Image (cartoon, rainbow, N blue to C red):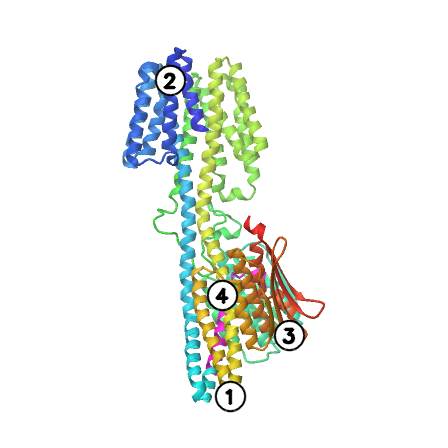
Amino acid sequence: MVLVSLFVIDGSYVWLEHPARWELAAALLGFAAILGLQLSHSFPSLAPWSPRYRYATWVVQGLLTYLPILAFGVGWGGMTEFLTASAVLVFPSAIGWPLFCLGAVGDSLVFMHYGTGWETGAYAVIEAVLIPLIVIGLSRMSDMIVKLYRSREELSRLAVASERLRFARDLHDVLGFSLSAISLKCELAYRLLADAPAKAHEELGGVLRTSRKALADVRSVSRGYREMSLSGEADAAVSMLSAAGIRTSLNIDDSALPARVDTVLATVLREGLTNMLRHSKAEQCEIRAERRDGSAVLTLANDGIGRSRIPKSGARNGLTALDSRVQELGGTLSHGSDGHGWFRLEAAVPLPAQAEGEPDAGCVGASGTGGPDRPVLAPRGLGHPDIVPRAASAIACAVLVGYFLAYAEIALAYHPTFGHGLAVELCLSATLVIQLAISFQWRFAWAAHRPWVLRHGALAALLLLQFVPPLFLGQTWVGLPGFVAGAALLTLPAAAAWPLLAAVTAACGVELYAAGNAAWDITWQCAYTVTCALVVFGLSRMAQLASELHCSRTEIARLAVTTERLRFARDLHDLLGFSLSAITLKCELVRRLAPAKPVQAQAELTEVLGIARQALADVRTVAEGRQRMSLTAEAENATAMLAGVGIRATVDTDCGELPGEVETVLATTLREGLTNMLRHSKAAHCRITVERTTAGVRLVLVNDGVEGCADAGLDSKVNGGSGIGNLTTRVNAVNGRLEAGARADGWFELKAEVELLATAA
């Protein structure tokens, strides 16, 4: 819009010369050709030519710019400004900026050759620099924002790739050895069953210990990759302490904390409560989190100091580990008696400046961390981290100053007296300062407290500076109406901004008419006001967007890593938890069968080996982030596993072909449902059904283990456990719903329904 409006304004000078029709037609063709070339230079994606062709198009634009001046005179002179801008957009900086200077000189010489007086020459010099800067600013800033957006995506990709490598290392260290040991020991036990059953029994005991430890490691690693929050831990603490019969007082500051501080304080709260429940007989507990002297302070107190159950050596070890984590963030951890029979644990962690309610100048909301323990680093090859927002702000500032100089020269062209001239320049300077404050208010931390006061107050001041001075300065005051209209676009909602822009433009036209200006001057000034408003709005918004995109890169990367960690935790729990539980159950069965039924025991060991190999494959699947599961295969594995542990199963999974993502989710649901059933119930019968419905597909897993369950809280545990919580997230992601609970007939039911049409859409 700005480019076209600038072309229309500059092209209208040719029309004012009243050329012959054929000359006017030729001029229109020339304008259209230059506009097309300029658009291809400003937005290379419109014409993705190689650089050498772009150099040629710049030469063609130069010929179309200067040759018609011989026929049309100064009316064609405005085209030189676009050629000057294209020099920087087409050529490398080492060539482009010298050509920019030469173009500005050529533009100024053309106007001074055809103009009269020093005022025309001064205005020509300002316009020769200002218009090219506007074109360069809008063109380059849009390109910079696109590249910055892509670099943000690249940063997220690299951060996730780095996190996956760490996953692979952790899985190898934690589970690789355990699964390999299970496979080797099972093979050895298989060979020993016939000839040395006692030795085989011993090896199976080692397999059981290894599998139980691996299962505990899976749960530990899975929990470790979940982001912790102080508020979430506090809510969980209240429920847990209430169930334990401990009266709890909770007072938590709801304001957001930096991710690392939030995680460390949540860890302190969790460990402190664990120590309290393990080592004391508290009856009352107080949990308080507040901001104090630039720090986030967590206080955990209980009245169990005089009713200790065991010595505190284990507690001290845990508190020592917490102390090191708090000290990493420059904080302190203190604990001990308060002299009134209460034990107090207090952690104080200093907050970064922007976390204390003062947004960082230009980087509001940026986190800058890759999670609780690691920073997210910018990928190589992206250049200096601040160059894009700084360049965008510099271009916008230069254009605003250029407009100020242009209007200042227009005011002096009226030859005011010294006093009037000084007053005009002071009012223009005040207008410039206020406009800079509006355009760059996002860079000032103090403006974040009451931004609406600054915006509306500054707009009101601009309106006063635009329409009050003419009462005293007369026609020597033109003002900066484009700044007023641009400020309206920046500060007001669209429904109010555009009418105000039209009103300001019309009022300026009336003001110029009352001062005796010609109709063409009034028309030109009104068009220039609208163009100036669009430029002010566009450059200011693009500078802000460039800064926000730059500052959000690390936050986007942190969120991408967090999402990947949650994905990893879900997959680790869902895939490997089932396999290791099955290995444990089958090894226990083999130990019972070995003395009396060695052949059947060998068959069960063969299945254990298969499960262990599948678990190793699942480790690679989780680490690489690729996961595709077969519902049919899971049902077959479930049938064999349930038969091996003595549970009668009825399975019907004839539902036809399913979308890959839906099939994976249902297979995961089946696996996790069986894991929970084996872990939390004493089922004798199980029924697995997968069937098509009118809108999609339904998976139902039921068992009769509710009444015989040793854990009375089965319903709440299943609904509230991490496994079912993961499944709920997965099923919701494919537009489904998950239900779990005891039925009226005494059976427990887990049901997942997915709408296939909505998923496909």
Q: Residue 595: which numbered mark, if any?
A: 1
Mark toward the start of the polypeptide (1 vs 3): 1
Q: Residues within 10 Å of mark 2 (few under 14, many from 20)?
A: many
Residue type, numbered disc 4: Leu
- Relative to 270, residue 428 above or below: above
**SS at circle 3:** loop
Looking at this view, is 158 or 311 the one in front?
A: 158
Mark toward the start of the polypeptide (2 vs 3): 2
Residue type, numbered disc 3: Asp
Pointers 1 and 3 in contact (C-beta within 8 Å):
no
Residue at x-position 32% and y-position 33%: 90
Horizontal and vertical percent position of residue 355: 51, 53
Residue position for label 4: 572
Mark toward the start of the polypeptide (1 vs 2): 2
Query: CA–CA distance between discs 2 and 3?
Result: 89 Å
**SS at circle 2:** helix
Q: Which residues are magenta?
A: 205-233
Q: Residue 711: which numbered mark, if any?
A: 3
**SS at circle 1:** loop
- Relative to 359, residue 644 above or below: below
Query: CA–CA distance between discs 1 and 4?
Result: 35 Å
Horizontal and vertical percent position of residue 225: 49, 63
